[in-house]
Amino acid sequence: MEQEQFNKILAGVKKWMKHLLVRYEPRMEPMAEVGPFNLDRYYPADMLRSVKRVIVDRCPVPPLAATGIDQLAEIENWELKGIPWGNIIFIRRDLENWEAVHFHEILHAVQWQCLGADRYLTAWAIGTIIRGYRDNPLEEMAFRFQSQFETEDKSFDVVKEVSGEIEKWPESYFDIERIH
């Protein structure tokens, strides 16, 4: 894929996201005020204050069919449990009390914070197109830490762990030329 073509897709997603967040702003609630969860054992208080949650019937996805990339277009039909858009996480209404989905989506907000919007969206798109949703590096990391969260009763610093891993990522995770 050409950089210019990908930049147009990225700009479109970011514009869509900006409108989405304005529309849902009245419904946003800081994760620090949501509970009863034990997420403060994993995330610092300032992170839980800055990440906000919106409960929705269906998680919002941009019009990805317009990209012409089949692997992205199919996402529009997925029944996502949650999705991050920057530091705003959208959680499906039927899962609003499931602590693990909140843990997972806040972890994505940490990734987003570490990478910035362009690099996060680029890595997510490339990873999903090349490896598939579950094996894309951002999702693999989130599911791995979610599993640790669900199976071990030992707290850990998610921000430190995630930022440490991302620092070691190869530039190929952000190379749009890998998309054919």
Image: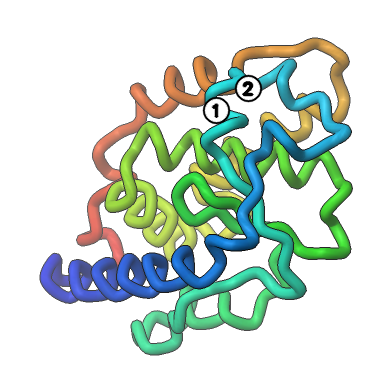
In front here: 8 or 74? 8
The residue that disc 2 covers is: 43
Please determine whether, in this image, residue 127 is positioned above or below residue 22.
Answer: above
In front here: 177 or 123? 123
Disc 2 and disc 1: Cα gap in Å? 6 Å
- The quadrant of the rendering that contains the C terminus is bottom left
| Numbered-mark total | 2
Q: Amino acid at mark 1?
A: Met
The residue that disc 1 covers is: 47
| Residue occupying the point 75% across, 12% down | 155
| Residue occupying the point 58% across, 59% down | 133
| Residue occupying the point 53% across, 61% down | 25
- Looking at the picture, how far across and down is residue 164, in whole percent? 43, 18
Find out whether the residues at labels 2 and 1 contact each other: C-beta distance under 8 Å: yes
- Looking at the picture, how far across and down is residue 103, in whole percent? 71, 37
Instruction: Tell me where residue 30 sits by quadrant.
Output: top right
Please determine whether, in this image, residue 19 is positioned above or below residue 87.
Answer: below
| Residue occupying the point 63% across, 22% down | 43
Please determine whether, in this image, residue 168 is positioned above or below residue 124.
Answer: above
Give the crowd class for mark 1: few <14, some 14-19, many >=20 residues within 10 Å.
Answer: some
Q: Amino acid at mark 2?
A: Tyr
- The quadrant of the rendering that contains the N terminus is bottom left
- Looking at the picture, how far across and down is residue 148, in whole percent? 77, 25
The secondary element bearing badge 2 is classed as: loop
In front here: 116 or 137? 116
